[in-house]
Image: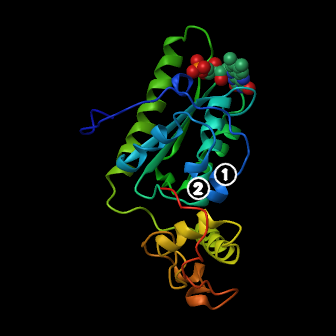
């Protein structure tokens, strides 16, 4: 990618990070990530993402899926799927495997789209046997990696993210309605949406991008429970992020 333009690149080896296994206590989902009982690197891992143009999620295939380290990262950032926030970032998914499980893993990691990431950066699956590679294998891996890098770079260069698809819009509308109805049970989600103007019925998506009106016939509160956008009564929780 360096040959295409100026690129600044930071990396994190999840194996080096102090990121404990999610306990499933729901504190982050319901009351805000600052309520997570695990005192580790989770906040430091999230902190640089909003300043980045893109994020590369890379995992080998272990037992037909992503590594436990990668899955735990997604688990520990699950609150960003409730309260999506990485809309200025493009994702690239990189998966390596000896033989099998590339598709399954490539289809699982893109759950990061629910954090807001633009998936136009693409995905690449590299077959890498755990032995010295032949020249042909090395060449193939290099070609596929360069192709993925180019695509990612061009996606990063785009001024505007692609318009959301039907399922993206539907997912937003579902969250909007559910958080409004469940404001007492899910105060962190409700407050985050209220603070970001996402409970406004005229809001068509999380952020202000063109939305195909065909995807959103319920705009302006035409169907279902009309969200109010009102602030919740004083409660114990503060939103995070
Ligand atoms: C514990 C373990 C499980 C693995 N499971 C699979 C698998 O299910 N399918 C596969 O194709 N390769 C599997 N592999 C091979 C790796 O995915 C492959 O060699 C990969 O390129 C290793 O990347 P790494 O050197 O970055 O760990 C496994 C390797 C290990 C160590």
Give the residue number, with chain letter if any, for mark 2.
Answer: 32
Give the residue drawn at x 60%, y 89%. Answer: 221
**Cβ atoms at labels 2 and 1 below 8 Å apart:** yes
Give the residue drawn at x 64%, y 72%. Answer: 170
Residue 210's place in the image compared with 63, above or below, is below
Q: Position of residue 106 (x, y in %)?
A: 63, 41
Which quadrant of the frame does ligand 1 lie within? top right
Q: Position of residue 75 (x, y in %)?
A: 65, 43
Q: Position of residue 125 (x, y in %)?
A: 58, 34
| Residue 5 left/right relative to 23 | left
* Dot placed on the residue nearer the N-terminal end, 2 or 1: 1
Q: Which mark is residue 157?
A: none
| Residue 221 left/right relative to 56 | right
Give the residue number, with chain letter if any, for mark 1.
Answer: 27
Give the residue drawn at x 64%, y 68%. Answer: 171
Give residue 131's quadrant in the image. Answer: top right
Query: Ligand 1 closer than 8 Å to the CB at disc 2?
Result: no
Element at label 1? helix
Of 138 and 182, nearer the camera is: 182
Residue 168's place in the image compared with 240, above or below, is below
| Residue 134 left/right relative to 8 | right
Element at label 2? loop
């Amino acid at each position: 990618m360096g040959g295409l333009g100026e690129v600044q690149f930071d990396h994190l080896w999840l194996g080096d990070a102090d990121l404990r296994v999610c306990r499933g206590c729901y504190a982050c989902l319901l009351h805000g990530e600052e309520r997570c009982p695990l005192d580790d690197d989770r906040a430091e891992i999230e902190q640089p993402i909003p300043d980045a143009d893109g994020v590369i999620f890379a995992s080998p295939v272990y037992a037909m899926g992503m590594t436990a380290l990668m899955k735990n990262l997604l688990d520990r950032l699950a609150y960003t799927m409730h309260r999506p926030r990485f809309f200025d970032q493009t994702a690239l998914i990189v998966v390596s495997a000896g033989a099998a499980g590339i598709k399954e893993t490539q289809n699982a990691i893109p759950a990061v789209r629910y954090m807001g990431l633009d998936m136009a950066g693409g995905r690449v699956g590299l077959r890498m046997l755990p032995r010295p590679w032949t020249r042909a294998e090395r060449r193939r891996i290099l070609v596929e990696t360069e192709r993925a890098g180019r695509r990612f770079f061009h996606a990063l260069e785009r001024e505007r993210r692609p318009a959301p698809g039907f399922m993206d819009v539907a997912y937003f509308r579902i969250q909007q309605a559910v958080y409004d109805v469940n404001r007492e049970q899910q105060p962190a989600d409700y407050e985050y949406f209220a603070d970001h103007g996402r409970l406004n019925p005229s809001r068509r998506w999380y952020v202000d991008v063109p939305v195909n009106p065909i995807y959103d016939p319920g705009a302006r509160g035409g169907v279902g429970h009309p969200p109010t956008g009102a602030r919740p009564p004083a409660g114990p929780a503060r939103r995070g992020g």
